[in-house]
């Protein structure tokens, strides 16, 4: 039995989803079986989503295994104070968000099982998204056309990245493209908010008043079990991508930044060799990249310390969506 087969069987056993692609497990790295449930007057349909109107090629949308909402999104969930988060260890990873004052921590061990959290922070609607296959935790403003949008998990992927869907129009949204790629809202952009992929210990120290997403989600999941165990340590991908680049290991962590119409990846392996923050320019705009080697936390700010939206991602994922990206290399001394 291959690594991917073991992975799918482990996830299905806990989530009680039906097996992907009928009764067999697809070996996605060699042959992704795309299930199109109907092609007729409405055009192609997958997991119940009409894919007739789309901005990406049909073959870039694949079935990830779970059905629509087989991975259940959370909406306005319960939070606990830091002092009550006994289920977290200091080195557990979290997505940290501070917005309009309040701070929230979203543990990866919970996001692994839900991938989407519809929340309100500091009075503002947000959607917290996480793709375990890409390692990407991204938080977006959820106010679309002056109305709060609620998102779910489609069970579909594009370039190995999660496709969300909004419950109003059932448009599919690409996390890393940051826009709707099918349906009535095609081309509508999401606004990325500054968030931090860091350790619980570091976030709690920096924000002692933080609230933490509770394991009391209303769903029976073993949040101490990682269904993706071992995936980040192998170069193998479960789902293929259209473009690859061998300058970095596929699973090398990078901080991806888009600024002034240009993109750049800051490899953690390079940042950890620096004794001071990296002062750089992206487009015509200055940028400072800070890195804590102890917690492997990277963040981008402007020269005045104001946070710049960025995303910590596996190199293969950042490159798949930004094939023109530059890679930061320090100037020779």
Image (tube, helix red, strand yellow):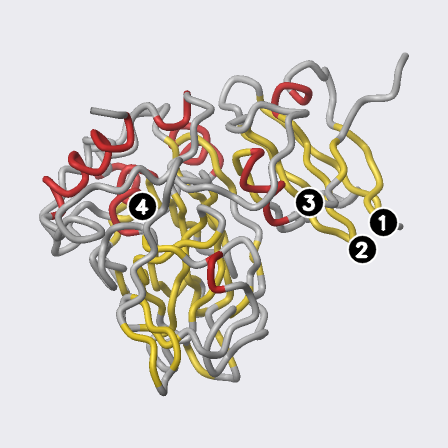
Identify the mark at residue 6; answer none if there is no mark.
Answer: none
Residue toward you, 129 or 81? 129
Q: Secondary structure at mark 3?
A: loop
Position of residue 115 relative to residue 189, above or below, is above
> Mark 1 to mark 2: distance in Å?
5 Å
- Give the x, y percent position of residue 200: 38, 32
Residue toward you, 86 or 290? 290
Disc 1 residue crowd, few under 14, some 14–19, many 20+, Cα 10 Å:
some
Position of residue 74 relative to residue 306, above or below, is below
Q: If you read the primary sequence from the N terminus, does the residue marked by circle 2 or circle 4 appear first?
A: 4
Identify the mark at residue 283; answer none if there is no mark.
Answer: 1
> Mark 3 to mark 1: distance in Å?
16 Å
Q: Secondary structure at mark 1?
A: loop
- Give the x, y percent position of residue 141: 51, 66
Location of the N terminus by quadrant is: top left
Q: Which residue is at a point 20% across and 32% down the rendered structure image?
A: 86
Q: Circle 2 sits on which residue? A: 260
Position of residue 47 relative to residue 322, above or below, is below
Q: If you read the primary sequence from the N terminus, does the residue marked by circle 3 or circle 1 appear first?
A: 1
- Give the x, y percent position of residue 131: 40, 46
Q: Circle 3 sits on which residue? A: 323
> Mark 2 to mark 3: distance in Å?
17 Å
Residue toward you, 161 or 304? 161
Q: Circle 4 sits on which residue? A: 111
Q: Is residue 278 left or right of residue 36?
A: right
Asked whether the residues under the numbered discs 1 and 2 touch, taking CB atoms below 8 Å apart as contact, a structural biologist would say yes
Disc 4 residue crowd, few under 14, some 14–19, many 20+, Cα 10 Å:
many
Residue toward you, 17 or 197? 17
């Amino acid at each position: 039995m291959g690594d991917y087969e073991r992975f799918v069987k482990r996830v299905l056993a806990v989530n009680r989803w039906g097996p992907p692609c009928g009764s067999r497990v697809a070996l996605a790295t060699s042959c992704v079986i795309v299930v199109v449930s109907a092609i007729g007057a409405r055009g192609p349909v997958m997991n119940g989503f009409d894919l007739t109107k789309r901005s990406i090629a049909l073959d870039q949308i694949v079935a990830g295994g779970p059905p629509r909402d087989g991975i259940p999104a959370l909406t306005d969930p319960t939070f606990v104070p830091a002092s009550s988060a006994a289920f977290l260890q200091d080195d557990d990873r979290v997505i940290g968000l501070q917005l309009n004052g309040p701070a929230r921590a979203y543990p990866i061990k919970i996001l692994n099982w839900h991938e989407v959290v519809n929340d309100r922070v500091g009075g503002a609607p947000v959607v917290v998204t996480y793709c375990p296959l890409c390692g990407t935790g991204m938080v977006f403003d959820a106010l679309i056309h002056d109305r709060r949008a609620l998102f779910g998990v489609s069970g579909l992927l594009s370039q190995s990245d999660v496709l969300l869907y909004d419950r109003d129009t059932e448009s599919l949204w690409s996390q890393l493209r940051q826009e709707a790629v099918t349906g009535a809202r095609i081309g509508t952009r999401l606004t990325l908010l500054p968030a931090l992929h860091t350790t619980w210990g570091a976030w709690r120290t920096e924000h002692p008043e933080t609230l933490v997403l509770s394991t009391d989600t209303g769903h029976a999941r073993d949040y101490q079990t990682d269904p993706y165990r071992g995936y980040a340590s192998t170069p193998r991908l479960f789902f293929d991508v259209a473009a690859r680049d061998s300058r970095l290991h596929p699973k090398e962590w990078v901080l991806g930044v888009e600024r002034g119409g240009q993109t750049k990846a800051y490899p953690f392996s390079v940042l950890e060799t620096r004794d001071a923050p990296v002062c750089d320019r992206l487009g015509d705009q200055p940028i400072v990249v800070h890195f804590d080697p102890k917690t492997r936390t990277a963040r981008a700010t402007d020269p005045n310390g104001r946070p710049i939206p960025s995303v910590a991602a596996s190199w293969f994922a950042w490159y798949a969506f930004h094939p023109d990206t530059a890679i930061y290399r320090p100037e020779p001394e």
